[in-house]
Image: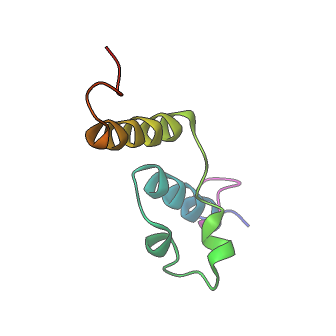
Amino acid sequence: MPHFGVPGLHSHDLRHTGNTIAASAGASLRDLMVGHDSVRAAMIYQHRTAEADRKIATTMNGKITEVLPAKASGP
């Protein structure tokens, strides 16, 4: 039975979309666990993206170059 006056749309669909958007905005696993019974259920929304991978790599590179001697970090 459809909800919200839209055929085929269910409350679970809205929850999934909201949690996916929250995860992509940086919500922690703990944040996403609100209303879930397990870590496994919350992990569903922790989709890996190329954008997230780039952000992680850039941040890691920045941290590494902060501690490397200038000579070792390149020309």
- Which residue is pictured at 68% across the width and 73% down the height? 40
- Which residue is pictured at 51% across the width and 61% down the height? 19
Query: To which quarter of the image does residue 36 belong?
Result: bottom right
Q: Start and end of the magenta stretch? A: 6-11
Question: In terms of depth relative to the viewer, which is nearer, 32 or 48?
Answer: 48
Left or right, 20 with respect to 60, comes to right
- Count of marks, rendered view: 0
Magenta stretch holds residue 60: no
| Residue 34, above or below 61 | below
Furthest residue in direction bottom, as rendered: 37
**Quarter placement of the N terminus:** bottom right
- Which residue is pictured at 30% across the width and 24% down the height? 71
Left or right, 51 with respect to 58, comes to right
Position of residue 3 measured from the top left corner of the image (x, y, whole percent): 62, 65
How is this picture coloured?
rainbow
**Quarter placement of the C terminus:** top left
Furthest residue in direction top, as rendered: 75
Left or right, 67 with respect to 24, comes to left
Question: In terms of depth relative to the viewer, which is nearer, 33 or 59?
Answer: 59
| Residue 60, above or below 42 | above
| Residue 66, above or below 71 | below
Magenta stretch holds residue 7: yes
Magenta portion: prevailing SS class: loop
Position of residue 5 measured from the top left corner of the image (x, y, whole percent): 57, 58
Position of residue 44 measured from the top left corner of the image (x, y, whole percent): 66, 62
- Which residue is pictured at 63% across the width and 59% down the height? 13
Question: In terms of depth relative to the viewer, which is nearer, 54 or 20?
Answer: 54
Position of residue 52 measured from the top left corner of the image (x, y, whole percent): 49, 41
| Residue 54, above or below 36 | above
Query: To which quarter of the image does residue 20 belong?
Result: bottom right
